[in-house]
Image (tube, helix red, strand yellow):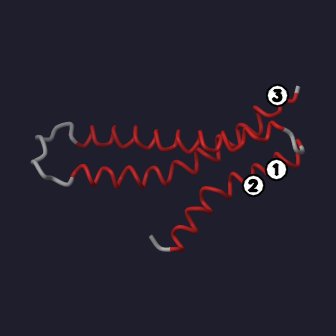
Amino acid sequence: MHTGAIAVLLLLFLVPFFWVSSQALMRFGWTWMLLLLPIAWLVGVFVGVIAALCMTGILEWLSNLNQPPAESGSMGGVAWLGIWLVIALITSPLFAALSTWLTANFLLPAFRR
């Protein structure tokens, strides 16, 4: 993978997390509750990957609904793996940013009371 693509993916995954974390830090200060933000980010990444897996499974099921079984040695599984990877690279940053934002705006103020 090219260095530029790696840098873009890192920015795509980490910039929303750092932005939400900095906003939460300015709002709450240094408290133990801010440790929930990296956990929420990681949970969001995993939920995004699982959502991509479910979406790919549904798309594959719909694709094979009225088709005969694939021939042995076909490359269909590798193609669906590539489709899953693309969908996972799209949904994981979105779910990670969403879970971090939800944690910073709803869970942290609830613990503060």
Relative to 59, residue 16 above or below: below
Query: Which residue does the image show at 65% across and 56% down from the upper left?
Result: 14
The three-letter code of the residue at mark 3 reads Phe
Q: Which residue is mark 1?
A: 23
Relative to 3, residue 71 above or below: above
At which x and y percent is residue 36?
73, 38
Element at label 1: helix
Query: Which residue does the image show at 66% across and 40% down from the upper left?
Result: 39
At which x and y percent is residue 89?
48, 54
In which quarter of the view is residue 19 placed? bottom right
Horizontal side of 69 relative to 112 (left or right) equals left
In the picture, the quarter occupied by the N terminus is: bottom left
Disc with the residue nearer the chain's start (3 vs 2): 2
Q: Rounded to the nearest whole Å, what is the CA distance between mark 3 and mark 2?
A: 21 Å
Query: Which residue does the image show at 44% across and 51% down from the upper left?
Result: 87
Q: Residues within 10 Å of mark 1 (few under 14, many from 20)?
A: some
Q: Which residue is mark 3?
A: 111
For the image shown, how many numbered marks are present on the structure?
A: 3
